[in-house]
Amino acid sequence: MTPESFFNPFLQFILKQNLHLISPELVVLAVLLLAIVLLAFGKNEAEREQSVWAISFLGTLGAIVTLITLYIQYYAPDAAALGSTLPQSYGNWMNQSVFFGMFEADQFSLFVRGLILLGTLFVISFSRNFIKERSEAQGEFYIILLSATLGSLLLSGARDLIMLFVALETLSVSSYIMVGFFRNTKASTEAALKYLLYGGAATAILLFGFSLFYGLSGSTDFTQIANHLRTADTSYPMLAIASVMVVGGFAFKLSAAPFHMWAPDVYEGAPTPVTAFLSVVSKVAGFAMTMRFLYMLFPNFEELLQTSALVDGRPIGFGLYEAVFAVIALIAILSMVIGNVVALTQNNIKRLLAYSTIGHAGYMLLGLLVLSQSGLSSLLYYLLSYLFTNLGAFAVIIYFNSLTGSDDINAYAGLVKKRPALTLIFTIFLLSLAGMPITAGFFGKFFLFQAVAQAGAWHLWLVVIALLTSTISIYYYLNVVRLMVIAEPSAEVEAMSPEPSQLSFSPVAISLGLCAFATLMIGVLAEPFLQLSADSVRDMGMLQMSPVSEVQQMHEKTKKTTSSVTLIEKVIAKH
Amino acid sequence: MILPEFITNHYLSILFLLPLLMACIVPLISEKNDGKYLHWFGIGGSALLFLYSALGWQGVVAPKTEQFSWIPSLGISYAVGSDGLTIAMVLLTTFLLLMACVASLTNIKKRLRLYYSMLFVLTTAVLGVFISRDFFLFFLSWELELIPMYLLIAIWGGPRRDYAAIKFVLYTLFGSIFLVAAILGIYFYAQNAGVLTETLFLFDSLPLMLGQGLPLTAQILLFSGLFITFAVKLPMVPFHTWLPDAHVEAPTPISMLLAGILLKMGAYGMLRFCFGFFPEAASVMAPYVALLAFINIVYTAGVALVQSDMKKLIAYSSVSHMGFVLLGLAALNPLGFNGAVFVMFSHGLVSAALFMCVGTLYTRTHSRQIADYGGFGTQTPIIFYFFLFMGMASLGLPLLVSFASESMVFYGAFVSNAFQQIPLGLFTLDWSMQTITILSALGVVIGAAYLLWLLKRVFYGPLQDRWKTLPDASRSEVFVLGTLAVLVLLYGFFPMQLTKHFEAEVSKIAQAYGKQQYVSVIPQKPCHLPGEKHTAKASRQ
């Protein structure tokens, strides 16, 4: 028996199930299991904990490498030349989906998974000293972090209500544990409890919304639900309620106002690397799922006009479309205003960033309002710039905390006297968050607002609100800069040792440098990133549903057979 | 002189990046010897920059337009170019930077590394505003200027510097909202018109796009948005309140730059964009611009009259004089436009010099209250001469540069036929351009009053005992004031030497307004009412 003939059945199985398309997830899963085994059966405890860090770091790096390989192999524009692209006949959409159409491994999910893995890699590198100094059980931390990452990764491609819910819960439950990881600290425990209670309620609402969708359409698959939405006019009020429930549940995950109450307390109480994870990785995953859900269920108006049956000259479902988007617009406005105005009064830097995150969620929700190619791709670009900027800012907070043990904004006063380089880097991040040139944040905001403004006249007013609130935001970002550069040194900074003469190469310092470099470069060299994000969402457009007549036929069928058992049987029989 | 081909080909990009390079070098220089090395680097660097920009001004190098695709998917390119208007502004910038660096010798004592880095970053941003030929690059430079200026005021400023600095930033950002809105509006219309090209934002292609069937209402909206942005920077009443604060708190060299260069960014933007890109909208809006110019000139001159703070008085006089730029622009004729640019230049020299004069007094007495002064004519005669000279220049004494520039504006405005009455919704104000011009001339009278009164109170009368040991102007101060005085005199005598550089370009912008400028001043039938786009078009045919 040759090795080839031995492996062939496995390869066949993998290729048939498209499992190679989720190889980054599989790598993370393998590392997760390995880490558990290592932690349970390793010899020396201290070494064990260290090796878990190393394994999770290398594993995430490995997942990124796998992801890049996957991209080059199948998705890159020149992959066609190599003859190894995915089958382009998107009529049969199963070609790039995994788990019988529950997970869509399109280029969009690839992009988002890249962001998630990159964010996780940075979080793992910040955590090393931070967790080591403060907790006994550092090995467990990385295991939970990896499982949260796994949840986020699966969330990026979920195109089925069940898949989405399972992935979301994986992420959420892991997040609750991570927030309360310092179980001897009051703040951390309190934050975890708060997060759990709020999160539980939000999940319940979300799940209720999901169940309504399932009950109305008889399917958990996004495509089926979407097809149903375009023919079902009778069930409109219930659909609107279901949609609003789901949007509310999503808004909780995105920490958008008025579902933002948990964010400041949780961000403040959680260990700082976890705060970074929540504000970046979890948010990216949240936006990915929201984008896919909304994009598939509520394609934009022009598409509605072309594909839906018309009643009184208006496409069916247009009222629903309007209602849902009015809700999102309201959430966006509230987030922008509350986030940026309340941030003005904060004294704790983590709380400040929590409110700033809420404000940013508002800007990004504007991108969601425009479910066009340009809207989605500029939102992806925004997420990219936001990732590096916010992670960098949190890295500075962690670094500063390791020097002084304080998160108070006033403690940053006069930092420039002791750590000029750190001050410069933090200033870059803050200015990027504020959207000043030439940072990534400036370009991200510009591209996003440009895409939103193109959508129509009343979108322009939303952009004007966004611009006004970002003018307010400059005040509190500059206030931190002012304290660091202009004010007299605080007691904490006075007590700080003078700058070490040689450069330190701790993981935090390296990731700080990388984030700062990326924040400056992504904006100036925006074109390739814009191209990449535009390519990523172009794929999503391919998921167009069948023409109206077929939809109606299908709808007739589903009316007859709404029992889930028969549906699952059908799906299995089909494949 | 033969320069390497690389420099002649990339003249403007080098000009753009040279100050940035210097800003990066500054932190490496030692702060020893009271920052002597840093001061000399600052002066040397800015002198180099000045000489380099003089190459373009004197025609040694013919600056080439450089352009390449930057973010083609959104129609953004990197494009820098130069014409007479740009190069005049660039030269003013680098010249005043040199003066400010020399003035820093006596005025700036602490944290020199940061100071000079920020000064050079600021220069990059300002130069970027003047030389960019792409709207996005312009916007980027426009915003880039904020943070260095914020720090320059907030670190080296006076007691209320925090307030003044953040006010400056918030006002300018508020103005920028309209700039962004205008840019987004252009995208919106470009998309609707189907002309979303890879080079949408080039100055060369924008007017084409805007000319293609953009409705007059949209043009007026875009015009107004841009106008507000630039009016905040200019500054124009009622958006002017940041300026006195910023000026009073800023250190002397920064006040010089603020008055000399930064305000010109607003004026430049107005001429280049509002009046250059939207001739139809500008014809409709001209009456209001003129009215605002009149209010600006007279109101702020009146406010200056009652100031007790010397620097605030000069700041208000600075705002008042920027009103002449508005007046010149509202004239919509080559003479008015040229006059406006000339005022920009002369105001840059004169108000910078006046701020320097106030600064030299302040470094000696640490007071800006006019009441604390008196009799300084005998104690500090050199400062007195220069202050008197610059005061005379500011109030428009013949044969000095302001006289030449302001009379050009007045002449341009007086012969203008831009409008005969000002429709104000409920009623129509029966003022023609001539009426406004005559009324605006009041500003000159009030200007003479507040300046002479200021000079009287500061330099005449009895000298307080505590000032009797004050030294007169130092060598570096004499150098700055002397250089400025020579230029004020020179361009007062030979205004052509200055105007010849930008005249062709500015007149080209004015061409869009047709031949209506040189017709007689006899009132004709009213035209250019808002909403009547046929009249605006018809009158030009």
Image: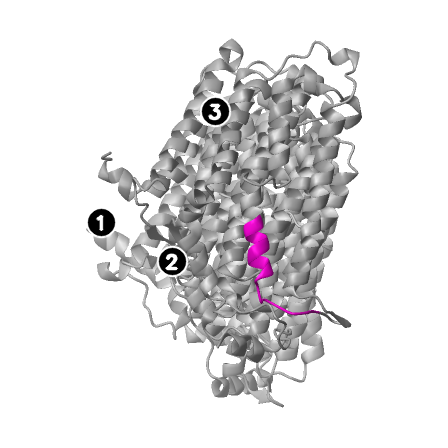
Q: Nearer the viewer, mark 1 or mark 2?
A: 2
Seen as rendered, the residue at the extreme left is: A2
Residue A262 in view, yes or no? no
Q: Amino acid at mark 3?
A: Ser
Between B499 and A336, the one nearer to me in the picture: B499
On what subunit does the disc labeled 3 rest?
Answer: A
Q: Which residue is mark 2?
A: B72
Q: What's the colour scheme?
A: one colour
Count of all numbered marks drawn on residues in the image: 3
- Element carrying mark 2: helix
Density class for disc 2 (Cα within 10 Å; few <14, some 14-19, many ≥20) is some
Q: Residues within 10 Å of mark 3 (few under 14, many from 20)?
A: few
Mark 3 or mark 1, earlier in chain: 1
> Hey, what amino acid is under mark 1?
Pro
User: Magenta residues, as a range?
Assistant: B407-422
Which residue is denoted by mark 1 in the rendering?
A3
Nearer to us: label 2 or label 3 = 2
Relative to residue A536, is residue B404 drawn left or right?
right
User: Quick one: label 1, few (<14), some, or many (20+) residues within 10 Å?
Assistant: few
Q: Which mark is residue B530?
A: none
Q: Is residue B421 magenta?
A: yes
Q: Residue at x 77, y 12 (%)?
A: B466
